[in-house]
Amino acid sequence: MRHRWTRAPALWAGLLATTSASACPDCPSARAVRVAVFEGGFWGPLVMVAVPFLCLGFLSALLYRVGLPTRKGEE
């Protein structure tokens, strides 16, 4: 029973330590990945994938809004 209270803080400490250890923005491999992502044609395919979902979501929200019954005071 005594160890039940120490599990959660130990888990949080472990998660925080691993995230801070893996966040090294100045290592050479991180710089190479950053250049490849932001300057290597990442945004074109991202837009081509995201825009159809945005259009479908907008159209769905519009049709949902049109199909809602009117309130008694709005007629």
Image (cartoon, rainbow, N blue to C red):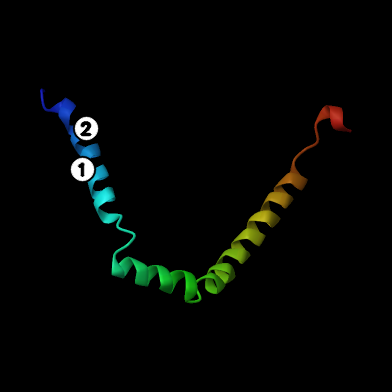
Q: Nearer the viewer, residue 25 or 46?
A: 25
Indicate whether 5 appears above or below 41. above
Mark 2 element type: helix
**Residue 41 placement (x, y as % from top left):** 51, 76
In the picture as drawn, the residue positioned furthest to the top comes out as 1
**Residue 1 placement (x, y as % from top left):** 11, 23
Q: Give the amino acid type for the residue marked by disc 2 in the picture.
A: Pro
Indicate whether 43 appears above or below 16. below
- Residue at 58 percent across and 68 percent down: it is 47
- Left or right, residue 46 beside residue 71: left
Which quarter of the rendering shows the C terminus?
A: top right
- Left or right, residue 41 beside residue 71: left
Dot 1 corresponds to which residue? 14
Q: Nearer the viewer, residue 30 or 68?
A: 30
Dot 2 corresponds to which residue? 9
Question: Marks 2 and 1, Cα distance to the nearest angstrom?
Answer: 9 Å
- Residue at 53 percent across and 73 percent down: it is 45
Tally of numbered tags: 2
Q: Nearer the viewer, residue 39 or 42?
A: 39
